[in-house]
Image (cartoon, rainbow, N blue to C red):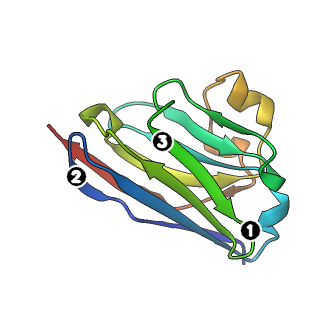
Amino acid sequence: EARLVESGGGLVQSGGTLRLSCAASGFPARHEDMAWVRQAPGKGLEWVAGILSGRSRIHYGDAVKGRFTISRDDAQNMLYLQMTSLTPEDTATYYCAADFLWGRLVSNIPPDQGDFGFWGQGTQVTVSS
């Protein structure tokens, strides 16, 4: 069974840092483009960052550029998101996802869960002011 399992979310003060992890299993994640997507309360899904298979290209959403760093460890089937300088606007459920059209990320076309071949259950990040 293919699975993506996120961890590392929690409550943090404004200006703080968090590192999210995503463990992939049941499919060859190293061959898949992967991404982090978030959903704030009452809002739609938003691209956070994506990374191509082979780490040849990375793209960030404008809201997180310069503050978040996406990385992957294909030997461990892991995806990471290092988040710094967090603000209350970063409060959201963060989802790990794989197998999607890269062009939708770079064009900032709002994502939908159906756009992804693999989708995690999400981890909550809450940033207090």
Q: Please state which amino acid type lies under the numbered disc 1.
A: Asp
Q: Distance between the Cα atoms at labels 3 and 2?
A: 15 Å
Does dot 1 land on a helix, a strand or a loop? loop
Query: x, y (%) of residue 112?
Result: 62, 37
* Residue furthest to the left: 129
Which of the marked residues, 3 or 1, is nearer the chain's N terminus? 3
Badge 1 crowding class, 10 Å Cα cut-off, few under 14, some 14 to 19, many 20 or more, is some
Does dot 2 land on a helix, a strand or a loop? strand
* Observer-nearest of 45 and 19: 19
Please identify the quarter of the rendering in which residue 19 is found. Answer: bottom left
Does dot 3 land on a helix, a strand or a loop? strand
Q: Please state which amino acid type lies under the numbered disc 2.
A: Val
Tag of residue 12: 2
Query: x, y (%) of residue 125?
Result: 33, 51
Badge 2 crowding class, 10 Å Cα cut-off, few under 14, some 14 to 19, many 20 or more, is some
Residue 53 shown left or right of residue 5 in the figure: right
Tag of residue 68: 3
Looking at the image, how many numbered discs can be counted on the residues? 3
Residue 43 shown left or right of residue 49 in the figure: left
In this figure, which residue is indicated by the disc labeled 1? Answer: 74
Q: Distance between the Cα atoms at labels 2 and 1?
A: 28 Å
Which of the marked residues, 3 or 2, is nearer the chain's N terminus? 2
Tag of residue 108: none
* Observer-nearest of 84 and 12: 84
